[in-house]
Image (cartoon, rainbow, N blue to C red):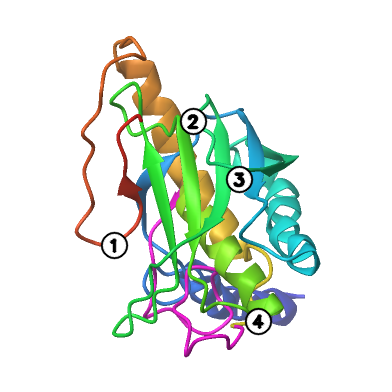
Amino acid sequence: MKKFLAALFVTLATIAPVVAQSCTVGVAAAPVGFWTWAPQSHIQVYISASDFEPGEIPYLLTPLTTWNSVSEATGSGVKFEYQGLTTSPLYCENCLTIVRGQVFDKSKRHLTELKTYSARKNKIMTWAAIVIDPLLTNPRALTNALVHELGHSFGLLDCYSCKPKSTVMLQFKSVNVPNDMDQPSNCDVAQVKISYQSVVAELRRAPQIKPNVVDEGEEPVDDDTPIVIRKP
């Protein structure tokens, strides 16, 4: 019995460091500190009718479903609800519009962008747009890119140093080559949970500010998204 307990102790001691390091930031997990949707919010999602082919729509909707599936596990309580096609971006409370636009950055293999606005000056997103460059046409890569940008809206930063398939916040190797990250990883779930614990604590401490205050916003130096936009 003593030998069995000793062996068990050695085994647990060997495994514990691996578990602790499994979601090391910069290795298998993205850092946090981005703008986020308000906890427990329902986001109305629209797709620009003139920017996407009918066959591309399902690939844009898949990321909404995969992030919805971990809503409770992340502690965000945020759910996306597809509302249909639109002829122009929507600037309503908790609205997200998916559009195409020129954003390609060759040096960073950057093909998508999250543009957002905070009416309350607290980095809680009021509305947003995900802009996808016309060069991005591969259906699987389209899904991977959108999963990535939605990750930003939960507070995740890019992690270009992270191991392949460890997080949706990875960099693309080249244009139209999928990174095989169709859904948030366990480390993404863990990091979003940390992000929203911080968000909830901050909201409890912060005084309420009227939502009609214009926010100039800021762009974090760690990442080139989201780009903050003013109210039209």
What distance separates the C-alpha of mark 1 from that of mark 3? 22 Å
Pointer 4 residue: 138
Pointer 3 residue: 74
Q: Residues within 10 Å of mark 1 (few under 14, many from 20)?
A: few
Q: The residue tagged with tag 2: helix, strand or loop?
A: loop
Image quadrant in which the N terminus is located: bottom right
Among numbered discs 4 and 2, the one appearing first in the sequence: 2
Among numbered discs 1 and 3, the one appearing first in the sequence: 3
User: Residue 168 magenta-drawn?
Assistant: yes
Pointer 2 residue: 91
Q: Residue at x 44, y 44 (%)?
A: 195
Among numbered discs 2 and 1, the one appearing first in the sequence: 2
Circle on res. 223: 1
Could you tell me the amino acid type at mark 1? Asp
> Left or right of 34: which side holds 154?
right
What distance separates the C-alpha of mark 1 from that of mark 4? 24 Å
What distance separates the C-alpha of mark 3 from that of mark 4? 29 Å
Q: How far from the left and from the top, in percent, is residue 173? A: 47, 89
Among numbered discs 2 and 3, the one appearing first in the sequence: 3
Residue contact between numbered discs 2 and 1, judged by CB atoms under 8 Å: no
Q: How far from the left and from the top, in percent, is residue 91? A: 49, 30
Q: Residue at x 36, y 14 (%)?
A: 211
Which of the two discs, 1 and 4, sits closer to the camera? 4
